[in-house]
């Protein structure tokens, strides 16, 4: 007969280890050597059985006391002792282990521990889209939004039972919502927990369902919610309005209302982050001589002096005339960028053409910096 290893050694513990340390070590090793995670590995299967055997003894105060006093002989008849060790997995509840391995389930072993059906559960979130104008996004606005959301049934106050009646605790699961079953497998007898089939996992029986909600305890109702859209919000952003979603279960908190913002384009302003851009047309004479112009902003018109000789495409910055920055102090704003477009006149009459030609004849290359620079580069290119 092969010599058995010390049970404390099997679990990687010292004699005198606490119950918590034994449980922790067992869970870790049981997951490490579980056959489902080590298919076709006889060594892992052997170690898995060895770990379970050690745990059965050390997690039982009476067996552990005998083992500490007499060793293997105190718990295994084959060693001459008086204990009755089965050598399999009788009575071992692996629910927590499988929950760790399979994320709450036991795969082919019958399902993991069900959550408490009477525990509070958060209500569902509701997502809607709200279209607003460009100026509303810049300045902020309040909007009323009508939504459909789940509420407690007003007829039965959310119980699901017909008025004048009440729910009853499920006799099969005693209100827990799940039942414990034993299943024999190649590793021995194993325990698992499954949703109660009698109550559908609810833990209660409704003998006379509410006529309005059909026993669900919930109903869909229209609700108008006032939503405050902050100044500075941009297209595609989502506002999270807490506690305005569907009602929770068993006293759980409500879900949230998620409002996705769609901003309509403006015919004059264009937004870039917190800055605003505008194309401003001026005349040839205004560009050449300079002029005072009135520039529209989201706050109204402001005066700006265009310097003489301003070229097409020149950009001027109006500081602090952009969009209010979200979650920043009031007045912390972007800028407005003014792009100058010089408009060349069309449809000139004879007199205008003659006047323009006469004016042109008074000019020379020193009046055209870009033109002079360009032709100088051409000259240099062909003189090489």
Image: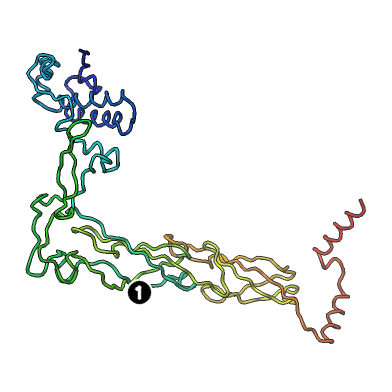
Q: Residue at x 29, y 42 (%)?
A: 103
Residue projecting furthest to the right? 383
* SS for dot 1: strand
In the displayed structure, would residue 174 be above or below residue 108? below
Is 300 on the left-hand or right-hand side of 347? Answer: left
Closer to the camera, 254 or 366?
254
Residue 4 lies, in percent from the top left, at 21, 16
In the displayed structure, would residue 7 be above or below residue 288? above
Residue 191, quarter of picture: top left
Closer to the camera, 18 or 192?
192
Closer to the camera, 267 or 5?
5
Q: Quadrant of the N terminus?
A: top left
Residue 276 lies, in percent from the top left, at 56, 67
Q: Residue at x 16, y 27 (%)?
A: 56
In the displayed structure, would residue 120 be above or below residue 30? below
Q: Residue at x 85, y 66 (%)?
A: 366
Q: How would you rate the neighbour count of disc 1 (Cα within 10 Å): few for under 14, some for 14-19, many for 20 or more? A: few
- Tell me, what colour scheme is on the image? rainbow
Q: Residue at x 8, y 52 (%)?
A: 171
Residue 294 lies, in percent from the top left, at 61, 77
Residue 136 lies, in percent from the top left, at 45, 72
Location of mark 1 (residue): 144
In the displayed structure, would residue 48 be above or below residue 226? above
């Amino acid at each position: 007969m092969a010599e058995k290893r010390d049970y404390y050694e099997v679990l990687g513990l010292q004699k005198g280890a606490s119950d918590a340390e034994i449980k922790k070590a067992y869970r870790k090793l049981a997951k490490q050597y579980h056959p489902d995670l080590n298919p076709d590995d006889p060594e892992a299967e052997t170690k898995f059985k060895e770990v379970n055997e050690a745990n059965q003894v050390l997690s039982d105060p009476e067996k552990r006391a005998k083992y500490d006093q007499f060793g293997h002989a105190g718990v295994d008849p084959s060693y001459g002792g008086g204990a009755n060790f089965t050598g399999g997995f009788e009575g071992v509840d692996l629910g927590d282990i499988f929950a760790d391995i399979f994320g709450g389930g036991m795969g082919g072993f019958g399902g993991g521990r069900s959550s408490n059906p009477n525990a509070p559960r958060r209500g569902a979130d509701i997502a809607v889209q709200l279209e607003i104008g460009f100026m509303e996004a810049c300045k902020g606005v309040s909007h009323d939004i009508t939504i459909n959301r789940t509420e407690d049934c007003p007829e039965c106050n959310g119980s699901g039972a017909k008025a004048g009646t009440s729910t009853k605790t499920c006799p099969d699961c005693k209100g827990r919502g799940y039942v414990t079953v034993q299943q024999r497998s190649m590793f021995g007898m194993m325990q698992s927990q499954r949703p109660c089939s009698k109550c559908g996992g609810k833990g209660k029986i409704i003998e006379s369902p509410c006529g309005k909600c059909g026993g669900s305890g919930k109903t869909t109702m229209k609700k108008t919610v006032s939503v405050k859209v902050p100044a500075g919000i941009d297209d595609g952003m989502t506002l999270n309005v807490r506690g305005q979603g569907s009602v929770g279960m068993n006293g759980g908190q409500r879900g949230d209302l998620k409002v996705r913002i769609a901003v309509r384009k403006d015919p004059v302003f264009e937004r870039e982050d917190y800055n605003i851009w505008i194309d401003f047309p001026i005349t040839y004479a205004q560009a050449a001589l300079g002029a005072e112009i009135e520039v529209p902003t989201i706050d109204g018109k402001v005066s700006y002096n265009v310097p003489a000789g301003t070229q097409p495409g020149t950009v001027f910055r109006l500081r602090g005339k952009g969009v209010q920055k979200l979650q920043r102090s009031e007045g912390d704003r972007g800028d407005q960028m003014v792009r100058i477009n010089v408009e060349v006149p069309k449809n000139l009459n004879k007199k205008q053409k003659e006047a323009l030609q006469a004016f042109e004849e008074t000019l020379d290359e020193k009046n055209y910096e870009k033109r002079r620079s360009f032709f100088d580069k051409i000259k240099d290119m062909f003189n090489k």
